[in-house]
Every structure is written in C-alpha cells, then in structure tokens.
Image (spheres, helix red, strand yellow):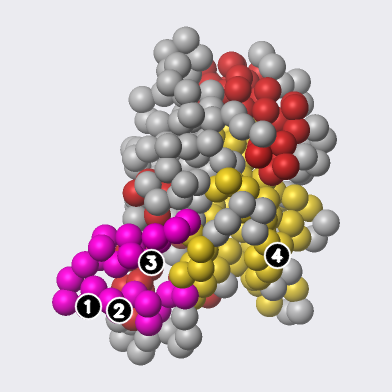
Amino acid sequence: MRLTVVGCSGSFAGPESPASSYLVQTEQAGRTWSIVLDLGNGALGPLQRHLDPAELDAVFISHLHPDHCVDICGLYVTRKYRPGGAVPGRLAIHASAGAEKRFALMYHGLENTAMSQEFAVQELADAHVTRVGPFTVTAYRVNHPVEAYGFRVEADDAVLAYTGDTDACPALGRLMTGADLALMDSAFVDGRDETAGVHLSGSRAARAAQEAGGVKRLMLTHIPPWNDPEVCRAQAAAVWSGPLDLAVQGKTYEV
C-alpha cells in the first residue's frame, strides 16, 4: 500500500502545499486501485500528477470544512465535461450527513442538481466499514466542531490510520491501534493553542498514538502555514520515541 501526500497544509492552502488530500494505492488482479482521503483547496491540481481523476475508485471525505472537501467541485467538472464525453458511471463519495446538498451548493449554478449524476454520495457513520477492491476502510467519529471522521485503511496486511481533524478522544484508540503508519492532525502548538475539541498538537498526537498501542510510525500533517513544522515535530518528539515524520507534499511513502 502506497500513500502519496497530495496536500498537507492545515486550514488553508499554503505556499508549499494545497490543503488536505492523500492518495492511497495498491495493486490487485493486474490493476492499480486508488482512493483519496479528502480533497481540500488546491488538491485536484497536483493529484493529476499521479493519476487521471477518472481512475479514482472512491473518495473519502473526513468532514465538510472547505480545506478537506472543496475540490470536489473541480472533480465534478473533470468527470462531466471532458471533451471525449463524461466518465461512465458514478464515483462513490463517502462523507458525513448532508454532504450531497453541501457539494451541490458549493458548485451551485444552472445545474445545481447535476452532481448526483456524477457522484454516488454515501453517508458515513461511526465504525462503518466500506470495501473498495482490496481496501477495507473503517470510519471512526472523532472530536471536531462538526461531524468528522478518521479513516483506518487496511490492505496488503498493512494499516494506515488517518485522523482527519480531531482533538484527543477515545475513538483514536480504535482508529490507530497496531497501525503501520498514523497520519495525524498537528495543527495546534502547545502553549499557544488551548481551545479544546478542535485539533491536536504534536505532543497530543504523540500521546494519542502511544495510548493506542502498537503504532509503528507517526507522521504529522495538517500544519498551517503560520506554524513552524519543526516546532510541531519537537513537541511530538518530546513524547514519541519511535519513527517520526512530517508529511511532505508530493512525496510517496510505503505503508
């Protein structure tokens, strides 16, 4: 299983990266299976360096804040209006309640109901399991001001745990236990950001990974452009003694 960081900037696109988006791929039966976790501001552009969007097998949206979902609008255009004709069938989009209406309103124009012809929007729920080819994706409801989910992605005997946006919560244990790679929100900085129920800091992410147990590798992401990533790394390293990375836009990792 391969993870490609399409975008890792927190809250809005930064000078070095689009907002949140992660391409996960694996091989089975002579073909490449591809899913995307989130599609935030600016992500659709660099995603096309890695595959034709028509080749996506499914999209999973952690929550409906724009920095995680707004490029769904562009994805719709790539499917409906390509010169050779629309992409056959409907692409499965897994998202929280109200997503189909939200997507239509974001695009809203002469064709404000047409997204349903291109996308099959399916509502997430806590502990809901979705299978896409060789992938098993389990959604866990996490701790954010809106309905939000983390995703546990399993394939090839490997586990990728993506928290989406969250503060510490019991669901992180179920999400991350035994994960080969935990891709974790680290938008907050200890000593500066004290609001509860929104984001993790580096140290809180590291602590949650420790408490989950069996996490082999920790990767910090969703770091806003106004943060110094090395501060986030240092705060995590004060707690976490295992392999620790910062997500890097455009880089591919083996899970």
Q: Marks 4 and 2: which is nearer the front?
A: 2
Separation of marks 4 and 2 at Cα, in angstroms: 29 Å
Visible residue check, residue 220: yes
Q: Identify the residue at horizontal 58%, vertical 64% (top origin).
A: 35
Q: Identify the residue at horizontal 50%, vertical 46% (top origin).
A: 148
Side of 50 relative to 33 (left or right): left
Separation of marks 3 and 2 at Cα, in angstroms: 11 Å
Residue where numbered disc 4 is placed? 135
Mark 4 and mark 2 lie on one chain; the one further toward the N terminus is 2
**Span colored in magenta:** 96-120
Separation of marks 2 and 1 at Cα, in angstroms: 5 Å
Residue where numbered disc 1 is placed? 111
Separation of marks 3 and 1 at Cα, in angstroms: 14 Å
The percent coordinates of residue 153 (x first, y second) are 68, 55
Q: Marks 3 and 4: which is nearer the front?
A: 3
Q: Identify the residue at horizontal 59%, vertical 29% (top origin).
A: 168
Q: Residues within 10 Å of mark 2 (few under 14, many from 20)?
A: some
Residue where numbered disc 2 is placed? 114
Which quadrant does the N terminus fall into? bottom right
Kind of element beneath mark 3: helix
C-beta proximity under 8 Å, tags 3 and 2: no
Q: Residues within 10 Å of mark 3 (few under 14, many from 20)?
A: many
Side of 235 relative to 20 (left or right): right
Q: Marks 3 and 1: which is nearer the front?
A: 3
Q: Marks 4 and 1: which is nearer the front?
A: 1
The disc labelled 3 sits on which kind of residue? Answer: Glu
The disc labelled 1 sits on which kind of residue? Answer: Glu
Residue where numbered disc 3 is placed? 100
The percent coordinates of residue 109 (x first, y second) are 17, 71
